[in-house]
């Protein structure tokens, strides 16, 4: 019971973190058809900028400055780089963002070194939010969750209840039509890209204080974020939230489950044979918990590429 | 390239410095094939710096074979393919002895490459001194005459921890084993299970998790909590150790950690006071060193010797002892003679005596068990914490038995 | 046409005759160059010709390597006898089988989804392989030794090089022959308009699976050559880094030109071999080159070369020479400025420099670069890159104008010649 509750809490907070990063990515893809390989790099840059500001001036200022600077970088990337290769097709845009991800990682290594930096929250934030079954639950995890929920509410209200959101949704559906109605669609694209980047930067700034901040964090998180975005449905904010929670919960629970194919086969009496064969049969779910999200992504891509809540294309 | 330039300059200096008519002395060439870029960079550079410290020492005292020892650095980029490429480059450059330590996978690659090279090129053998790769198989089924391991292994560290903690009354009767799912982690798990009888404890659960992929250890901490152990034994390093301890600290888990790599640079800075009271087994603790080595090392490199640097210094110093016993008279260097000499070499260090076991070329080194305390003589990572010595276990007591899988073929 | 054959023949002669005179290090670098080139050419079959962008080609490269190592192990343990030079066949077989299986599922989707499926497949291999001891040797991987055959020991890097050269030349020839067949034409058609291909009666999915398998087969051969050269393989061959490298090589070389990927792979492999010992920031340069090519030369280096060859007779060499001289000057200035700044920062922000600063209580000692010493906060240090940057930027508009004008002239002349030719043909048709 204790394991269930703790794992659920952990899964939800980890899932909300994934959502913070994937929200921007799914919006950008839905709108521009560009799968931004550099999105996780924005996450990493946010963490490093926040680290620099936090260690020189103030932690909270870092949380404020990081998303702004990363958002501006996003706008720069969209306007000056992506737009230039737009004419060559989606593959080229994809490759450009891929090259950018490469460059960002190397730049971080140049300035900060190839090892983790000590970015952590100030000591007064390091207290338990509540105690459950004798285990303390750190406040900062709850804080991350709250920021993520706040972000979701903000985005949702922005898209559904404001005029700007209306224009964004129109531009996503029918960009040419929206432009002929007089809206500045390139500006909208730029804004969406910048906002997506800013949110990834915010996620990095907030989460980097809790999780390790190192040059590999873009790759580590990046691949999982792709899984989330695909499973949730490319372009769907709600789908992204659902998929993040799903994967977060799964990662959390899988750790405690020592199921294996051999265990399954022992129900039909073939357990000992399976164990003697070894290899694939004795792999436990807990030891391959990092692999299963990819399997999930593969299944979703093959069976229902629209994902949980995306639109059929 | 810088090392190459130094080597060339030194070589040229030697060539022009000798009086005309004297035979050309063959300089000993040491190749450091390390992770100088990539995620293991910080550790790789420590190995290189420590090795060069001792080579400078030897060169100040006249070098070897009538010439200064040349050191060439190669960056294997943290991968086995890079290591294979750089080994071929090292052979092309005439390297006699290869040094490496930052990864067991890379050490596995290099030791196999060395073995195959020696089979194909009799008379032009190359030697491999393993400074820090602790996978048992390197002195097990991958052992061969030209490989020497100068670091501990999982059984050495676990047995030391168990004995010292039991004596101090801090081991308890319920032990939880959590490790990374690869050869090192599996070695640690086996060693923890094997020591249960002597340690008088029950292994309540064993966990193997993915290496360096897990961002969030709180589910694992929840599992540990459920099992209610007294001590958690883990061989985790880098993020895997740090995140595990942080998650345990955040959850308020009251358990003792018995680790092998707690002294890795940056861990104490990141963990802060959550690290207090936890144990580590390592080959060296500066608190027990009253010689002039710490200050001499600081003068040369700018910091006190940490983490894997002291074991590297000891390894290369032992090589220096072996070199003193061979004499090629300024002529061609025969690596087989150096290897035979290294088998018989020994070194006295502040922690104890170091010798080499001829059956599998495992160095018999003392193991120190330490505990994180406040305000030691040598605080680490710029914090107020450091490692207090609990017990120093001499080499012969710490060593593990020769593995059956090692069938070493000796040269004629 | 004749010129092209002469060029290729000349290159082959150099590749055969020169290596015995080079050191072992260079021979190994050339072997790696051949492997990377073959891998990139195989990849381009899928990307450039069929228009299917795959981000997980490392899967087939790795599978080829592992299959070959199993065969090598079997030969070493005397379970079977098999000629060593034919070892890469194991890689080919493994590549085609796994490629067919993976390709069947991957080609059910297109565009970004296809790319994601290939990424997922490679990641699956990458995360499963370290746990699967039997097939992939766990995280240490598999290791074996090349056995002698027919009097050759295959112990020296030179013999391995010739083996790799042989297989690479044969494979690239087969790939070229493929483009000459009807099926090769169909591949291009698939890229240009899949719907029309379907309406012509072909089963697009089956066609794609076949193309995918062929591409995977040659990737498997490349992986096999790596296994033969290094005599080991481990799960890191499945990593995204390997998939990323082949993408970089192909597009910098140019995916629209047949030899483009080989050019890109060769340049980057040799660049890496040479530069990686000098500086640790070479990956950054690689990324920058890739992004610049993507932005300004989307056809890649191969495409640029192709354009020159195409309009060879229309080029006014003095005019082009002048334009290129100015452009080269700009490139040299901007590149030097960038390299100076990047290398300086690499030193200033490195842990070694921080350690030196720590010893001097926070002072900023001068650093060594290009054989000279530079003060960190002195204007004399930074005036150099700034000056180079200024000169480069000042000349940039001139260079762009000259290049644009020169190429406009060339294209005008080409167009005029084409019109003249068609007028002659028309006149001839009318007369007859």
Image: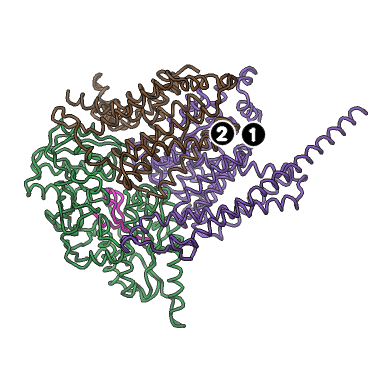
Chain colours: A brown, B green, C purple
Q: Please give the residue where the numbered disc 1 appears in the rendered image.
A: C179
Q: Is residue C167 visible?
A: no
Name the residue at 31% across, 54% down: B101
Q: Please, is residue B153 above or below residue C260 in the view? A: below
Query: Quarter-wise, where is residue A143 in the image?
Result: top left
Circle 1 SS class: helix
Q: Please give the residue where the numbered disc 2 appears in the rendered image.
A: A83
Q: Please, is residue A219 above or below residue C324 in the view? A: above
Circle 2 SS class: helix
- Rendered location of residue B57, percent (x, y): 30, 70
Left or right side of A200 for B259:
left
Instruction: Look at the image and give the residue range highlighted in magenta.
Output: B126-151
Viewer-side label of 2, 1:
2
Name the residue at 40% across, 52% down: B76
> Badge 2, how many Cα within 10 Å: few under 14, some, many 20+?
some
> Badge 1, how many Cα within 10 Å: few under 14, some, many 20+?
some
- Give me the disc on residue A65: none
Name the residue at 9% across, 40% down: B201
């Amino acid at each position: 019971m204790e394991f269930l509750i703790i794992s659920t809490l952990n899964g939800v907070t980890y899932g909300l973190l994934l959502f913070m990063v994937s929200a921007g990515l799914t919006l950008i893809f839905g709108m521009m058809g560009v799968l931004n390989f550099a999105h996780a790099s924005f996450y990493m840059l946010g963490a490093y900028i926040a680290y620099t500001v936090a260690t020189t001036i103030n932690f909270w200022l870092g949380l404020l400055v990081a998303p702004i600077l990363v958002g501006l970088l996003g706008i720069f990337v969209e306007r000056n780089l992506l737009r230039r290769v737009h004419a060559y097709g989606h593959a080229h845009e994809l490759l450009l963002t891929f090259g950018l991800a490469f460059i960002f990682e190397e730049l971080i290594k140049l300035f900060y070194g190839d090892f983790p930096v000590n970015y952590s929250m100030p000591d007064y934030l390091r207290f338990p939010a509540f105690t459950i079954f004798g285990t303390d639950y750190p406040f900062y995890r709850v804080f991350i969750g709250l920021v993520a929920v706040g972000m979701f509410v903000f985005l949702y209200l922005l898209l559904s209840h404001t005029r700007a959101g209306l224009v964004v949704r129109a531009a996503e559906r029918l960009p040419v039509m929206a432009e002929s109605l007089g809206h500045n669609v390139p500006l909208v694209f730029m804004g969406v890209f910048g906002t997506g980047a800013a949110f990834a930067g915010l996620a990095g700034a907030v989460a980097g204080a809790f999780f390790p901040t190192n040059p590999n964090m873009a790759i580590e998180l990046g691949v999982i974020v792709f899984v989330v975005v695909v499973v949730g449905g490319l372009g769907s904010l709600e789908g992204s939230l659902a998929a993040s929670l799903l994967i977060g919960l799964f990662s959390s629970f899988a750790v405690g489950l020592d199921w294996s194919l051999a265990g399954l086969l022992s129900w039909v009496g073939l357990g000992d044979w399976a164990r003697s064969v070894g290899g694939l049969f004795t792999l436990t779910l807990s030891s391959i918990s990092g692999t299963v999200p990819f399997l999930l992504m593969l299944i979703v891509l093959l069976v229902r590429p629209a994902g949980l809540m995306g639109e059929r294309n | 390239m810088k090392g190459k330039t130094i080597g060339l300059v030194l070589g040229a200096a030697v060539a022009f410095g000798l009086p005309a008519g004297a035979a050309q002395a063959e300089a000993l060439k040491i190749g450091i094939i390390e992770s100088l870029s990539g995620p293991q960079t910080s550790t790789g550079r420590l190995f290189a710096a420590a090795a060069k410290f001792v080579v400078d020492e030897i060169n100040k005292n006249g070098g070897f074979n009538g010439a200064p020892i040349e050191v060439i650095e190669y960056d294997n980029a943290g991968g086995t393919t890079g290591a294979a490429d750089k080994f071929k480059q090292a052979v092309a450059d005439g390297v006699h002895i290869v040094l490496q330590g930052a990864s067991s996978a890379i050490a596995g690659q290099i030791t196999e490459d060395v073995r195959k090279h020696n089979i194909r090129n009799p008379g032009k053998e190359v030697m491999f001194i393993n400074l820090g790769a602790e996978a048992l198989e390197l002195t097990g089924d991958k052992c061969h005459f030209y490989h020497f391991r100068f670091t501990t292994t999982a059984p050495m560290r676990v047995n030391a921890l168990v004995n010292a903690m039991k004596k101090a009354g801090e081991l308890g009767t319920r032990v939880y084993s959590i490790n990374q799912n690869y050869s090192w982690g599996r070695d640690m798990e086996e060693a923890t299970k094997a020591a249960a009888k002597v340690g008088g404890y029950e292994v309540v659960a064993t966990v193997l998790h993915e290496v360096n992929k897990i961002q969030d250890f709180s589910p694992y901490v929840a599992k540990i909590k459920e099992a209610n152990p007294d001590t958690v034994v883990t061989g985790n390093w880098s993020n895997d150790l740090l995140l595990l301890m942080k998650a345990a600290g955040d959850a308020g888990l009251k358990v003792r950690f018995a680790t092998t790599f707690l002294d890795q640079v940056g861990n104490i800075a990141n963990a802060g006071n959550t690290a207090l009271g936890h144990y580590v087994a390592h080959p060296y603790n500066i608190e027990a060193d009253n010689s002039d080595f710490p200050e001499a090392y600081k003068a040369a490199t700018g910091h006190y010797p940490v983490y894997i640097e002291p074991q590297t210094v000891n390894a290369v110093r032992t090589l220096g002892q072996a070199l003193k016993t061979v004499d090629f008279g300024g002529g061609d260097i025969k690596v087989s003679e150096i290897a035979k000499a290294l088998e018989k070499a020994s070194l006295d260090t502040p922690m104890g005596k170091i010798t080499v076991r001829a059956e599998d070329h495992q160095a018999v080194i003392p193991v120190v068990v330490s505990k994180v305390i406040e305000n030691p003589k040598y605080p680490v990572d710029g914090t107020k914490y450091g490692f207090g010595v609990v017990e120093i276990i001499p080499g012969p007591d710490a060593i593990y038995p020769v593995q059956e899988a090692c069938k070493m073929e000796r040269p004629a | 046409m004749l010129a092209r054959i002469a060029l290729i023949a000349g290159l082959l002669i150099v590749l055969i005759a020169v290596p015995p005179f080079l050191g072992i290090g260079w021979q190994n670098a050339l072997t790696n160059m051949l492997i990377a080139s073959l891998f990139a050419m195989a990849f381009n079959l899928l990307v450039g010709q069929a228009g299917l962008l795959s981000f997980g080609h490392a899967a087939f490269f790795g599978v080829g390597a592992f299959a070959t190592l199993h065969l090598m192990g079997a030969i070493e343990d005397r379970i079977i006898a098999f000629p060593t030079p034919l070892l890469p066949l194991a890689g080919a077989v493994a590549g085609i089988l796994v490629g067919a299986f993976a390709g069947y599922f991957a080609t059910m989707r297109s565009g970004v989804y296809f790319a994601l499926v290939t990424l997922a497949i490679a990641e699956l291999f990458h995360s499963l392989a370290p746990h699967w001891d039997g097939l992939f040797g766990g995280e240490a991987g598999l290791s074996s030794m090349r056995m002698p055959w027919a009097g050759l020991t295959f112990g020296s890097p030179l013999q391995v090089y010739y083996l790799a050269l042989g297989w690479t030349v044969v494979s690239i020839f087969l790939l070229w022959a493929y483009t000459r067949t009807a099926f090769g034409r169909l591949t291009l058609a698939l890229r240009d308009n899949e719907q029309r291909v379907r309406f012509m009666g072909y089963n697009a999915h089956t066609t794609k699976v076949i193309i995918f398998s062929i591409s995977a087969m040659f990737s498997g051969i490349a992986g096999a050559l790596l296994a033969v050269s290094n005599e080991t393989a481990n799960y890191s061959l499945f990593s995204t880094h390997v998939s990323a490298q082949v993408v970089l090589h192909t597009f910098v070389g140019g995916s629209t030109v047949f030899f483009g990927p080989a050019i890109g792979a060769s340049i980057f492999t040799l660049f890496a071999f040479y530069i990686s010992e000098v500086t640790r920031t070479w990956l950054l340069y690689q990324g920058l080159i890739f992004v610049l090519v993507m932005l300004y030369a989307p056809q890649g280096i191969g495409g640029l070369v192709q354009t020159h060859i195409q309009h060879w007779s229309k080029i006014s060499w003095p005019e082009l020479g002048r334009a290129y001289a100015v452009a080269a000057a700009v490139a040299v200035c901007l590149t030097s400025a960038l390299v100076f700044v990047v290398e300086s920062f690499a030193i200033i922000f490195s842990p070694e420099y921080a350690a030196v600063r720590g010893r001097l209580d926070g002072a900023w000692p001068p650093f060594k670069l290009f054989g000279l010493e530079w003060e960190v906060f002195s204007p004399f240090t930074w005036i150099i890159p700034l000056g180079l940057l200024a000169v480069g930027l000042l000349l940039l508009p001139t260079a762009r104008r000259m290049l644009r004008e020169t190429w406009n002239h060339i294209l005008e002349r080409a167009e005029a010649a084409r019109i003249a030719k068609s007028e002659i043909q028309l006149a001839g048709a009318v007369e007859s």
